[in-house]
Amino acid sequence: MPMIPNLIPITCTINGETVSLSVSPRETLADMLRDRLGLTATHLGCEHGACGACTIVYDGRTARACLLLAAQADGAVIETLEGASASGRIAALQRAFHERGALQCGFCTPGLLLAAAEVLAEHPAPSRDAIRAALSGHLCRCTGYQAIVDAIEATAAAATGAGSRR
Amino acid sequence: MSTDLPAPAGEPVPHRRTWRLLHGRGRYVGDIRLPGLLHAAVLRAPHAHASIDAIDTAAAAAVPGVMAVFTGADIATVCAPWRGTHGLYPRLAAPLQHAVAIDTVRWCGEPVALVVAASRAVAEDATALIAVDYTPRPALADPEAARGGGPLLHPDLGTNVCLTAAHEAGDVDAAFAAAAVVVEETFRFGRHTGVPLEPRGLVADFDPSERRLTVHHSHQCPHQMQHEFARLLGLAEQRVRVIAPDVGGAFGIKQQLYGDEIAVCAASLLLGRPVAWIADRLESFSADIHAREHVVRGRIALSADGDILAFAVDDLHAIGPYSQYPRSSAGEGRAVLAQTGAPYRYRALRARSTAVFQTKGMAGHYRGVGQPIACAVTEALVDRAARKVGLDPVAVRRRNLVRAADLPWRAPTGLVYPRLAVADCMAALDAHVDLAALRRDCDDARRAGRMRGLGLATFVELTSRGPGFYGAGGVPVSSRDGCTVRLEPGGGVRALASVTEQGQGTETGIAQVIAAALGVPLDTVEVITGDTATTFHGGGTWGSRSMAIGGEAAWRAGRALRAEILDVAARLLQADAAALDLRDGVIVEAATSAARLTLAEIAAVGHFRPHELPAGPQPQLVASASFGPLDGPFRAGSGIQLAVVEIDPDSGAVRLDRFVVVHECGRVVNPLLVDEQIRGGVAQGIGATLFEELIYDTDGQLLTGSLADYLLPTAADLCDIELVHVHAAPPESDGLGLIGVGEAGTVGAAAAVLNAVDDALAARGASIGQIPCTPERILTALGAI
Ligand code: FES
Ligand code: FES
């Protein structure tokens, strides 16, 4: 007979807002974001850390929300695709993905956008092989990845090109 | 119509739905929350084959938050069982299947009970408290054993063979007797599955006050499901509504009826509350449709000049314990029979296909349905025979490809091809790559001690099928699709299309076709799909058909609405309709392009001030059309795929260095999206050839139940895929001349990669006739382990 779990109070920052709630000890961060806060862009493709669809930004680094417990969010600063999208920080990537056809069903896309933003933050002009290597923890079943690599490469080229014109 | 479609059809427009998905605004079934929503979890069989002696649900039912526990017998009170029969195959043995097993389980993962609770977590906890007494029975996990007999899975059928189909044409024995070389080889294909990244799932919402069922369903064929839910649950079909929201990939995996899914509908019926269920990944691997577990003994007869004289194939296909429903398990073997040797002029064929039951997961239709098997066997045999007779495999292909002069080509398979562009594709491949230089590059590498290989696969993809298979076989699956186009009061256009969308871009293509048919800007056309209550009954996504069939319907509806708009305009302007045109959303004088009326003005008269119209028919401002091919059983796409690989002799790993696809598919509505369909299909074919395999042990236990065990290709595993489009004269017999494209990449990719790996291995005198070509198998072939 499973025990009725105790609830753990947490406070964290999610997409710039302070959120306080009580979470169950076994609740994953992904379930908390999706079911409690309606942040459904965090997708669940495997719930075992293999696909990357649940990727979020946790204290400045991408992380898999299916492998984190909600209780671990206490004190953390978290950004989901909704937040990254609203802030405009991934707007160039979003446009490049759209124009290049770098998504089909879109289920992998939230994770890939956040991963791509991290790649570009660390390597402003990555090679195609470096992009492929950096994305190797993210599964996309629809595209074959080439258009995703193209979109990230084009975003990098536009950003560095703009930089050199300045 | 000229070679090109009228703009904006034919333009590389981005898929519009993706803008929303990129902003986190997707709405997949797992995102849907209805008032009073309950959650289901499925208890699944831990044995591959066992009788169920007793089930005790009391402890599970007592868990706080649990609303109900349903056994197979409970579900059967509202849900009829089914058999996956097919009228064209009266001898197909189709066992009775229940949504949830009642007295016997026949695969590890078969549903045994359903718990419905306030949350998924509680439902899962409670499933662990259901006590089931099983008496294990022998598993049957080896297809060859099943053909010969083995423990009977369905004693009432008296056999483990689901279906044997055979076809023979020409004098096969004489052809083999006359051959300069005969190559015979057994090819083994691993069991695969589609792995849409979004697992299967649904939210079923039954309203007992009106006996109305609404199902939000991650599915390719919502109309088919409406029909089946109504039939099996005893509901009036017009009160069953299936809505396919955003769907996170499907690939054939979301094409059938599943026991777990209809059981969720049954639970909603029994409880009168909405019930949600989303598969987890282990459930997906154990209970999604599997495919492609084949053992094929193939033979080819080649003359000394390199003429292909004959093929003989004996295909053994392992399905699960039942014939899939509603489409039956006849299609996969049929495709192997129909597609053997497809691109080539040869005269004699002996083909047999046997589907056998297994105590493994249900098998059915995955992207390509049997065609990748036929292509791989054909192309591997061509390569081997060419080498054996001492000819270049590419030269043998050139010599035997069906040419324009051979059309209509009556193939030994019994299919008649009015149009086939494989020879044009070869010419285009020659223009794109220097095959001789690629050959030299591989040979140079070989001399330097490396294992580099070049593989080619010519392929034919049968798309856009008419009613000859399902309809004629008594299977209620539509080969048609429909579209309604209407002018909204503000002058915009709204279309309701029965085709469905899983990311291919069909909606965008439909919008392009309608904008072109009407003469309005693309962004004024809105397309709604995936709702059986608002759209025509139609086939949805299967067999590479959505644009070729749904696009034709949209074109016809758009042209009809355009004619009415011009008629209304002519009456308002007291002009001759033939002297008017609709261009870029404005009624103009055809001769001068002078603007006369906006669409908004027409719409306002039609909707609000019809009394201003001179006498004549009442304005409708809506038009519909439905279309399905009746002039032939299919439309064939053609292509060639080329792979260059290098094998690491120490690890056995295969690196892809180059991949080229040459493809021909009639007129193209959206070249950007067509290219990405092909690339995505190729990636799945490469995955099947190098990485993916569902492995069962001899007890029928699935050993690859996670994404750490069943390996999908990642970005780092693949190379860029170069695409070359061939523009042969489009088919003219029916309208736009579109040919489907969704499975093309998958049909040829496995063959190209397998041939490239085999070519690389030939450097060491080794060979492999099995996919996936895992490092272990490659090292074994090399004798290294
Ligand atoms: S859902 Fe978290 S990695 Fe797949
Ligand atoms: S777009 Fe479908 S999984 Fe990536």
Image: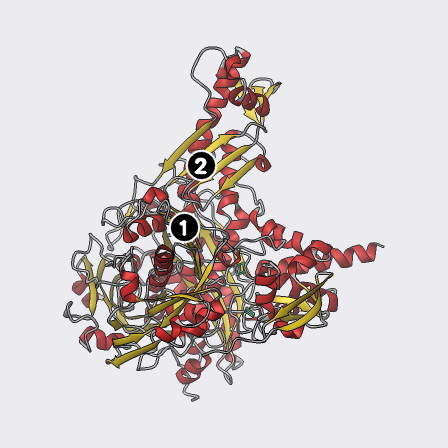
- Check the residue under mark 2 and report the chain it is in: B
Q: Amino acid at mark 2?
A: Ala
Q: Classify mark 1: residues with Cα within 10 Å, few (<14), some (14-19) or many (20+).
A: many
User: Which quarter of the image is occupied by the N terminus of chain A?
Assistant: bottom left
Q: Secondary structure at mark 1?
A: loop
Residue closest to the far bottom = B785
Q: Secondary structure at mark 2?
A: helix
Residue closest to the eye, B479 or B132: B132
Q: Is residue B46 above or below residue B326?
A: below
User: Which quarter of the image is occupied by the C terminus of chain A?
Assistant: bottom right
**Which residue is under mark 2?**
B554
**Which residue is under mark 1?**
B541
Query: Looking at the picture, how far across and down is residue B433, in whole percent?
Result: 52, 59
- Check the residue under mark 1 and report the chain it is in: B
Q: Is residue B50 above or below residue B335?
A: below
Residue closest to the eye, A99 or B237: B237
Look at 56% across and 27% down and name the residue there: B489
Q: Is residue B302 visible?
A: no
Q: Is residue B698 left or right of residue B737?
A: left
> Residue B393 falls in which quadrant of the image?
bottom left
> Residue B480 falls in which quadrant of the image?
top left
Earlier in the chain: of badge 2 and badge 1, it is: 1
Q: Is residue B258 visible?
A: yes
